[in-house]
Image: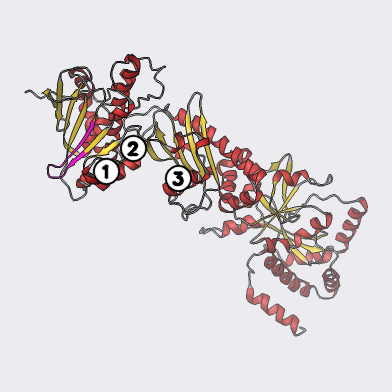
Amino acid sequence: MAKRKFKAESKRLLDLMINSIYTHKEIFLRELISNGSDAIDKLYYRSLTDGNTGLSRESFAIDLGVDKEARTLTITDNGIGMTKEEMEKNLGTIARSGSLDFKTQMDMAEAGDVDIIGQFGVGFYSAFMVSSKVTVVSRAFGSEETWVWESAGADGYTLKEGEKETNGTEITLTIKEDRSDENYSRFLEDYQIRALVKKYSDYIRYPIRLAGSGEEGDPEVLNSMVPLWKKQKSDLTDEDYNNFYKEKYYDFTDPIKVIHTDVEGVVSYTALLFIPGQAPMDYYSKDFEKGLQLYSSGVMIMEKCPDLLPDHFSFVRGLVDSQDLSLNISREMLQHDRQLRAIEQRLEKKIKQELLELLNKDRKTYEEFFRHFGLQLKYGVYERYGMNKDKIQDLLVYHSSAQEEMVTLAEYVSRMPEDQKAIYYACGESIERIDRMPQTEVLKDKGYEILYMTDDIDEFAVQMMGTFEEKPFKSVSADDLELESSEEEKAQSEKQEEESRQVLDIMKEALEGKVTDVRLTHRLKTHPVCLTARGGLSLEMEKVLNAMPVEEKVQAERVLEINDSHPILETLKTLAEKDPEKVKTYAGLLYSQALLIEGLPVEDPVAFSNVICDLMIGE
């Protein structure tokens, strides 16, 4: 019997598939089981249209058998089978899809729950990743003939008559011998087959049975067949969802939120999403991989599909199942990014909608969620130059000077006094430390609310937002707080500034290279001094950037502000007349105090200590 040659392009594709295209060899079993499911779907559809097959859905199954001694794994279905011409056409030419032809020829509109997903003649060849020889025995439904197709790889194949008592297809893989870098024998172990079926094919709608592994040697059904996400929501309880989540994603805590949605349209899909109750250990590390599991009609295509989630919602776990996705060679690589993008956009809107509902109806639970994942939302505001800020800023909550409960930006703006022009915020290491910042005193005195921010990313995110509801953000450490003053107050400030000009000039000279300016301020009530910053680089941003492992350090344009109502000012003015050098010494002391208050390092701790000691002994 002459060996038939693959077409040249098919031979090249087969070489490519075996050597490079498939990421994981284990998916060969998924492909062959899916093909068997497709074959059964085709026959079941015929039973619906012809009505004379005598078959029901309960009649169908996919059987797996292992012979360790012969090193064979057999996958058998009782589906529609193939004629000689179909075997020649489907198995002789790679990239020929029998399922696609079947869809073209038959009107599937009335098929109900029949869903043909396979790519027979494409995924089929994944068998050669683990097999030294593949034998296919098939008998078409309604035919008396059986045909045997056999191939040992890219060199070609044979096709001859054979024997098979019933319709369907039996594929026998002769598993390769082990190599130093590959353990092929694992595919002959029952536990490995169980694991692969559970991982990839658990929701195939027909029983997948492993011969001789059940009780008393009966076949063991390996798959559950009905995906939880395909069940009616009314039939599911919170416990059902929670147990599914904890078992599937190896979490010990219940999810904070479950999102179960069915969407029909240009791209139809079912999504089952979970917002975890706590962040995974590696969530904020480079090792974390975002992504949802992607299924096509119950068959898992990808373990983690990153294209289904925007980065700012990368904490979401779950899956998407769609029958509309067009797949290419391995079902691991998707042809139409446009379809994925459409799903991703709808999921993004749905996730935000659910989070807003949680925010508005259960603030305590939302704050718990935000404690774990708020940092990711803030990164989402900042990244890509704020491209997604409008989508996320409604979800941000902050501690506040006005109340213990965290507040949204909308809530803050809604209670701003009429004369307040900006959204005021303060950044620092802790809420307690921020609350004691000297720069907050005048704002509190005016009754203005201040947002307290403790994450390194906060200042960057706020500056990227710029405004919220047309109100600009303003740091309490900015040099200009845009506070309105009466004409009388302005005149008084100008007079006091002029009277203090000598001391201010002496201090500015003493601090040359350290500060941009020294000036009086009425933002302070009890504290003598504080530091503020001019320009786009704030003091908090300076601290964050300089904490990074970089050689070149940055420094904000610092301004030393002196409380215009503090007794220290009169002391300095008196000394400016009598002992200008003493003023310079005190300038360094006050500057160091301002650095400490701001949480910045003192530039010369020894000199600072000596000045303190001199003061203590009266020198």
Question: Image point 57% across, 36% down: which residue?
Answer: 350
Which element carries disc 2, helix, strand or loop?
loop
**Which amino acid lies under the numbered mark 2 shown in the image of this protein?**
Ser
What residue is disc 1 on? 193
Q: Residue furthest right?
A: 488
> Which x, y percent locates residue 354?
59, 40
What residue is disc 3 on? 244
Q: Is residue 321 left or right of residue 135?
A: right
Range of magenta residues: 65-76
- Which mark sits nearer the N-terminus, 3 or 2? 2
Q: Nearer the viewer, residue 341 or 463?
A: 341
Q: Which mark is residue 201?
A: 2
**Which amino acid lies under the numbered mark 1 shown in the image of this protein?**
Ile
> Which x, y percent locates residue 121?
25, 26
Q: Which mark is residue 570?
A: none
Q: Nearer the viewer, residue 580 or 6?
A: 6
> Which quadrant of the figure has residue 332?
top left
In the image, is residue 68 part of the stretch drawn in magenta? yes
Q: Residue furthest bottom?
A: 617
Question: Image point 59% across, 54% down: which residue?
Answer: 371
Is 457 drawn above or below residue 78 in the view shown? below
Asked whether disc 1 touches disc 2, contact meaning CB atoms under 8 Å apart, the reply is no
Measured in 3D between alpha carbons, the distance from the residue under mark 1 to the one under mark 3, in whole angstroms, is: 22 Å
